[in-house]
Amino acid sequence: MGGFSIVAIGYEVADALERYQRQHHIAGVSSFKQLLQFVESEISMPISLARLEDSAGLSRMFLCCYVDTHIRVYDCEELMAVTVPPQFTRVKEMLGIDGDLKRVFAPQGTVFSYDVNGRARVKEQCLVVV
């Protein structure tokens, strides 16, 4: 039985990320690190930025309160049961995000997450491909 290798809970942030990059005159992975550290300092919880790709190769960016990259099969009920910390919902207003919180499955992607000192929490930005 096959399954998706990544499950995530978060807000899709393509527009918000571009806006943040323009406002701060930064781009690329360094902007991801700065954004994550800023948001974490405001909501006092670890978060991740996930670039998730569907089976057709379409890539979408999510700011996540939960990402699991273990190679195992999730079911919808299991993902729906994951509790979203209340402070994470502040992210939507802070960054001017359009859209609602999503719980997504993806076959592949890259996860970025940094601690307060700027050290990566995931190895090699956790590239996951199955």
Image (cartoon, rainbow, N blue to C red):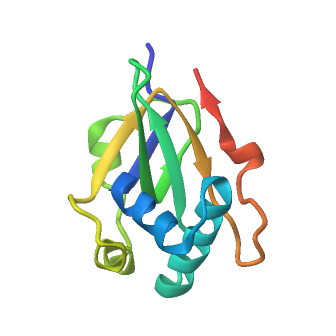
Q: Is residue 12 visible?
A: no
Tell me the residue at 46%/38% (across/down): 52
Nearer-the-camera pick, 37 or 8: 37
Query: In the figure, residue 128 lies in which quadrant?
Result: top right
Counting from the top left corner in percent of width and height, residue 70 is at 59, 37
For the N terminus, which image quadrant? top left
Query: In the figure, residue 19 lies in which quadrant?
Result: bottom left
Counting from the top left corner in percent of width and height, residue 119 is at 78, 65
Q: Is residue 91 above or below residue 83?
A: below
Q: Is residue 130 visible?
A: yes
Q: Is residue 108 above or below residue 122?
A: above
Tell me the residue at 47%/26% (across/down): 107
Tell me the residue at 28%/39% (across/down): 76
Residue 28 falls left or right of residue 103: right
Q: Is residue 102 above or below residue 65?
A: above
Counting from the top left corner in percent of width and height, residue 20 is at 46, 68
Counting from the top left corner in percent of width and height, residue 26 is at 60, 64
For the C terminus, which image quadrant? top right
